[in-house]
Amino acid sequence: MRILIVEDDQETRDFIARGLTEAGHAVVTSTDGRDGLFQATEGNFDVLVIDRMLPVIDGLSVVRMLRAGGCTIPVLILTAMGSIEDRVEGLQSGADDYLVKPFAFSELSARLLALGRRLPTTQAEPNRLVVGDIELDFERRLVRRAGRRVALQPREFLLLAELMRNPHRVVTRTMLLERVWDFDFEPKTNIVETHLSRLRAKLNAGFDEDAIETVRGAGYRIRGE
Amino acid sequence: MMRPLGHSTFGLAMLVSLALTLGAVGIGAISYEVTHEALEQQLDHRTATETRALLAEPGFDRTAAIAKGIARREGIPGPEHLEYLLVDAKGRHLAGQLDATAPQSTGYAEFLHYRDGRIGQSLTTRLADGAMLVVSADRAILDQTDRRLLLLFTSAFGTMLLLGLGGAWTLGALTRARLRRMDRAALAIIGGDLTHRMPIDGSDSEFDRLSATLNRMLDRIAALMTNLRQVSSDVAHDLRTPLTRLRNRLDEAATGAGEQRDAAIEAATFQADELLEIFAALLRISEVEGLGVRKQFRNVAIGEALIELADTYKPDAEASGHSIETDIAPDVHVLGDRRLLIQLAANLFDNALRHTPPGTRIQVALGVEDGVVRLRMRDDGPGVPETARARLFERFSRAEQSRSSTGHGLGLALVAAIAAAHRGEATLLPGPGFGVAVSLGPIRA
């Protein structure tokens, strides 16, 4: 993917750029809001990483201007710790995801991959998702594996849907907490692990192959074939 | 330095007394004028009466009869101060001792100058044969009364002005003295004596009430300062342990090799994450306490959210041998931040699951009582020691820490902060086990 990083802090910028380059992405960096805005409209990027606080033009204004100009490239906003208002404002400005600093690189990487392959937000979500031999029907709230019906609790259904929206890609624990439970904090107990192991047990009943892969230190991935 | 008069108490009182004096001078001038006019009219009245009496003197020759009348009147000494003059048509003196030139025209004359310098107020009448009769009253009485009035008024205004000045000065001095005491108190507080308070004399005056309000404000600030100091020292104290561990791990990593080094690096990362978690929790608490989150408040279906949350925790609870019993009214709504409210409840669930032995029952109830949303979460576990209950909702509460090796004593502090942001409070429930009651308000109709 072609990724633009707009971040004024050199250490953070280098840390992200190095990691993403090593992972095989084409990375362009920018250090202030005005230059970032220019680069974003000129270069043909798949995803933008924009810091909330930037010199010249702040991050949220950059996103607002991009959106006002008809740019639909997915944007991930980076914000400092302790910023409930930033999160709301960030999403209101037209950003697609946000990440609180400091973060693990694997978290950023997983989110960028999810964003980069995401369908444009204007397009309605399909009623049906199919990954490998697993089939999920939103309308009838039905899940089948290899044609066999799997009965799931509502939470487990949402959990599976989130994994299937990102086929072959890692979904982190934090992403699941945010999107399935609406948590923006880390609970002390293992609710993600517990629910995931239940989901896994139900999906795998009668099958040899594990439908959900645990990627150590990163998250979970739905197995395709 | 000259300040505008209206900006000090003395100046203000001075302005008021000046205005009052000016008003009184105005009233004085009017009464002086009215009195003066009345006296002049009285003199006119006397000359007219006298003229009529003279014209009514009996006798065939009118002029001669009047001359006789004049002579008779002048023969009797009296306090009338009236003087007469009768001249014939050619201006020759016929009768009367009035030592002045007869006016050419008939009617009232306000100022008739006597030859001896006195001034009279006169009435001149032309008789049938062309003779002129002048009756004049000395204006000395009038002038005397005028002077007396003027003296009276002037002394009254002078006294008023002096009293006003004195009053203004006294008022200014009293205010200044009172404010100076408050000023001294404020300077003492600025100087570092945070226990100093504004003086109160028990008079319940406006100054006293202001002082009392300021003192309440100072008490509040002092409490916040104490809290801040406490938190700062707690933060320093509580971060030392994980930082020391982190340092030791890094030490191991630097000296070790191979697998041992990898393990040390992993452990160091874990310690760093732990520190970041403490910071995140602290920042979240101070953010919620800052009340800026209220700007994002929306109508939250807290009943439904809590039912979902309880369902989320049930598998975990079962896995650890706990049971969760719920009594949640599903249609309860509250004005608030959904994610914060979820975090509040999740903290309580986390607490109950981590700090009680297997077999413990956890009861959750949500409902509306007296217009306030009440959330109660209680377990029948070992509870907390009596001595620790008081500080349980403060940051780095030792009791909360002692309940678990992994907690930082921040969970319940956040619960209290979130409840306060929602205009409610978190309290401990009495009785065995551990129970927390959280009130949230106001509810949305």
Image (cartoon, coloured by chain):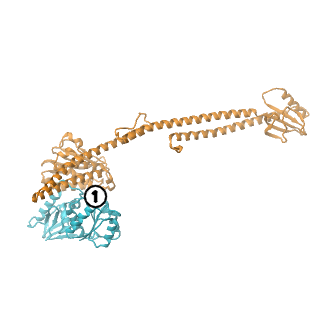
Chain colours: A cyan, B orange
Residue B342 image point, x, y percent:
24, 54
Q: Who's the residue at 37% across and 38% down the image?
A: B197
Residue B137 image point, x, y percent:
79, 34
**How many numbered badges does the structure rendering display?**
1
Q: Residues within 10 Å of mark 1 (few under 14, many from 20)?
A: few
Q: Who's the residue at 63% across and 39% down the image?
A: B25
Residue A64 image point, x, y percent:
34, 65
Is residue A198 left or right of A65 when viewed as pictured?
left
Figure quadrant of the N terminus of chain A: bottom left
Q: Is residue B373 among what the camera can see?
A: no
Figure quadrant of the C terminus of chain A: bottom left
Element at label 1: loop
Residue A65 image point, x, y percent:
35, 67
- Disc 1 residue type? Ala
**Which residue bears the numbered disc 1?**
A80
Q: Camera-side residue: A24 or B385?
A: A24
Q: Is residue B156 among what the camera can see?
A: yes
Is residue B155 left or right of A39 when viewed as pictured?
right
Q: Name the chain under label 1.
A: A
Query: Is residue A120 shown above or below B378?
Result: below
Q: Camera-side residue: B275 or B57?
A: B275
Q: Camera-side residue: B253 or A47?
A: B253
The quarter of the displayed image where residue B180 is located: top left
Q: Camera-side residue: A130 or B344?
A: B344
